Amino acid sequence: MKLFNYILLLLFISTANLTGNAQKSIDLNWQTDFEEAKKIASAQNKLILIYFTGSDWSQSCEMLNKDFFYTTKFQEIAKKSLILVRINSPRRTGLISGFQENKNLNLKKHYNQKVFPTVIITDAAGKKIAMLESYNYLHDTSKHYALIENALKL
């Protein structure tokens, strides 16, 4: 009986931890069409943040999502000041259409993007203001926040 109670207690504690650590949903309203994002940014007088990601293979991108993009702090900044564009370069076929893949490749060439993840800030016309490549395993997002803060000051 003691063993049964002990197991129940462990089960209760682990369930409580899971629900306590559950991350609330963050809706960032990512665009995939850069031309449409420029129109929205112009109409709302906002900057554009372009996020080049390898969603199905890049561990650094996964970490950046968790540590930076899917935080309440980033969500508040984005809603106020940014139009977000996600440019995905998956390795598995079928995750994005061939049409979208061609558009993404053209944008990668235009901004000379080579590293994953890459974050670029542009004005509403698409002129590059700032760029930050890569993400470290120290989970330090200070450079990403500084990138946005500096761009917003211009």
Image: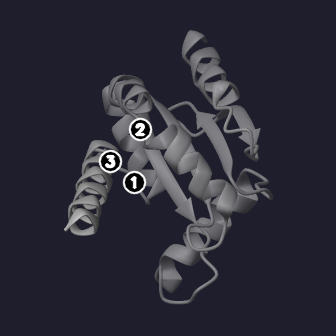
Q: Earlier in the sequence, mark 3 or mark 2?
A: 3
- Which residue appears at 31% of the width and 57% of the height? 10
The answer to which of 17 and 51 lies nearer the viewer is 17
Residue assigned mark 2: 83
Amino acid type assigned to the residue bearing label 1 in the image: Gln
Residue 119's place in the image compared with 74, above or below, is below
Q: Earlier in the sequence, mark 2 or mark 1?
A: 1
Amino acid type assigned to the residue bearing label 3 in the image: Asn
- Which residue appears at 32% of the width and 55% of the height? 14
Extreme bottom residue here? 93
Q: Are marks 3 and 2 in contact (CB under 8 Å)?
A: no
Numbered disc 3: secondary structure: helix
Numbered disc 2: secondary structure: strand
The answer to which of 36 and 30 lies nearer the viewer is 30
Q: Which mark is residue 3?
A: none
Q: Toward which corner of the image does residue 58 lie, by quadrant?
A: bottom right
Q: Is residue 34 left or right of residue 62?
A: left
Q: Is residue 142 left or right of residue 99?
A: right
Residue assigned mark 3: 17
Q: Position of residue 2 (x, y in %)?
A: 24, 63
Dot 2 alpha-carbon crowd within 10 angstroms: few under 14, some 14 to 19, many 20 or more: many
Numbered disc 1: secondary structure: loop
